[in-house]
Amino acid sequence: MSAAARSPAPGAPPGRGALRRNLPPARRFLAGRKRALVRLGGWSLLESAQTFLGGYCLAQALDRGFLAGQTGTGLLWLAVAAASILGAGPPMRGVFTQLAELTEPLRDALVRRAVRQALRRAVTDPARTDDRADTGAVSRLTHQTEIVRDSFAGLVLTVRAFVFNAVGALIGLLALAPELLLVVLPPLVLGIALFLATLLPMASAQRAFLDADEAVAEGVGAVSAGHRDLVACGAQADAAERTGRLIDAAEQTSRVLARWAALRTVALGVAGQLPVLLLLFATPWLLRQGVTTGALAGALTYLLQALLPALHSMMTALGAAGTRLLVVVDRFQDATAAPVPPKVPAPDPAMVAEVGPPRGRRPSRTALAVEVRAVTHAYGPDSPPVLDHLHLTVRRGEHIAVVGPSGIGKSTLAGVVSGLVAPDSGTVLLGGEPVTGATAQDLADRRVLIPQQAYVFTGSVRDNLLHLRPDATSGELSHAIGVLGVEPLVHQLGGPDAVLDPHGLSHGERQLLALCRAYLSSAPLVLLDEATCHLDPAAEARAERAFAERAFTDGARARDGALIVVAHRLSSARRADRVLVLDGTTPRFGTHEELLTSSALYRDLFGHWQHTPPPAGS
């Protein structure tokens, strides 16, 4: 969720704004459940009576019983106090029954709201939801609804307990000796006031913490989803740096939240411990005022057994569960706001694996564009190799298609040839020069790889298209856009200088932009790893023909490179000069007609492709 979507109104503290936004729906929710609230209050009044009897009976047992030499009377008063404790079971059962009448409808309402928001967002922003799951919606539907239910239940229980325990205790203190209120009430009121003053700032800190936590989750999710592109582009360091900044921000918000929690502890000490200390300090004065020993013991009972534990629970609940409840419920209120994509700086062209403007260096000229010698690669010491002593030669100017079942090693081969995957054994030569030991820039000058997950960054259309060759002329850019049929997309986006939102593009639109970028690259070898799978067959054919005939105006690489296509349609294989069939045992390499005779797997794939309708266009 973007900062713009979460920010409060100008000049309003975030916590106060959240409170103002959520009070009206909270009132409506509670107004519709008045009967449950009345029953909850009725059961809680019985708890007040038990609190009152606890301290009052102890005071009477001392003053009228044991200290007056009337043991039987003292035991009788203690029996009354014990009976009130034993009788607390039914009221608590009634309290929890009525609590369920409040919490479960709240949870159900939030689940329905989260589902409506997710559906609305899917309809209004299909490109984003198609690209990656709305992790915020999943969190609201599962984790955050449970936070609201548990926090609301705990808040109702603790606030109710404090209010009704305080009523019983204060009435008891008043009944024992009004002077006791003069000692106990001021620090109690001061501590509660100090605590209430921290609630809104703490809510703001809690909201910032949740925002940062969700940003970390979304950032890590984006890195995971784009891991292949990040590795292909050599952008691991940049991704790690940005993710680290998100984690640092989350750490900072947790420190701020901890400081407010410490201040809440101070307020708890003032309200919870200071009354006891003042009562003990004022004991001589109270005795001179005629307060009895039993009344003092009853006052301590009220403070230590009822009032202070309830106060501690309430402050803890309001300080943690209460602010968390306010923040999470507020997120349900503004979750429909459209996200604003962060401004992501364009990666350094020298770090991108698709990459590279020439730097005065041209690969050596040989008859072969690619040579793979006895390459073996497995994804683990105990795993069977996906490539097993593979030999492959691709001549300059040749168009090769690679086919085979899913998971057979086609993308692995593309990674090995491009130098992104180091084979376990064997040698790969590009333009007669080994891949092993080559720098990122050396590899970028020799080849460009477009994976299935096309990489597009936030920036202008022109920046994206010229990213691999910033010095390309306007004529070269126009030619690339025209030959690949990208004009309608560029016009739809607002022209070359329009700013791109990567999340607003479909997979096919991303692939078109990435293909145009690769076409402008100076690298002689082009590898398309299912880079047209989201295009319709006509657009795919146009792109493959353009790459097969690719030539720059300087004539340096006219038909001087090669094209390797990891194919997913029969038409791609038919357009190629030769086809490599990977079957997990003995690879076959030849023309389409030769493979129909020599490869049973190719015949099966040919029959499958013939009877499979083409997928819908992007």
Image (spheres, rainbow, N blue to C red):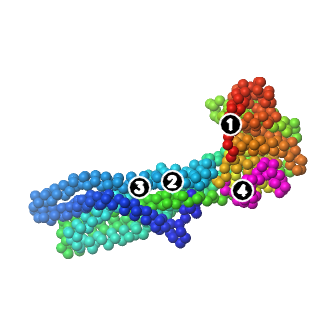
Q: Are marks 4 and 1 in contact (CB under 8 Å)?
A: no
The residue segment tinted magenta is: 473-502
Residue to which mark 2 is pinned: 116
- Tell me which amino acid carries mark 2: Arg
Mark 4: which secondary structure? helix
Give whichever of 125, 368 is nearer the camera.
Answer: 125
Separation of marks 4 and 3 at Cα, in angstroms: 44 Å
- In depth, the one of 104 and 35 nearer the eye is 35
Q: In the image, 111: left or right of 158?
A: right
Place residue 571 in its image quadrant.
top right
Q: Local crowd at mark 4 within 10 Å, few (<14), some, or many (≥20)?
A: few
Kind of residue at disc 3? Leu
* Left or right relative to 12: residue 389: right
Residue ID for mark 4: 492
Picture layout, residue 329 above or below residue 617:
below
Mark 2 vs 3: CB contact within 8 A: no
**How far apart, in angstroms, are the residues tagged by discs 2 and 4?**
30 Å
Task: Look at discs 4 and 3 and give the one toward the viewer.
Answer: 4
Q: Amino acid at mark 4?
A: Gln
Kind of element beneath mark 1: loop
Residue 478 image point, x, y percent: 82, 54
Residue that appears at 66% across and 50% down: 506
Looking at numbered disc 1 in the image, what kind of residue is underneath it? Pro
Residue at the disc numbered 3: 106
Foreground of the two, 601 or 522: 601
In front: label 1 or label 3? 1
Mark found first going from the N terminus, 4 or 1: 4
Query: In the image, is residue 417 above or below residue 321?
Result: above
**Residues under labels 1 and 2: Cα distance?**
35 Å
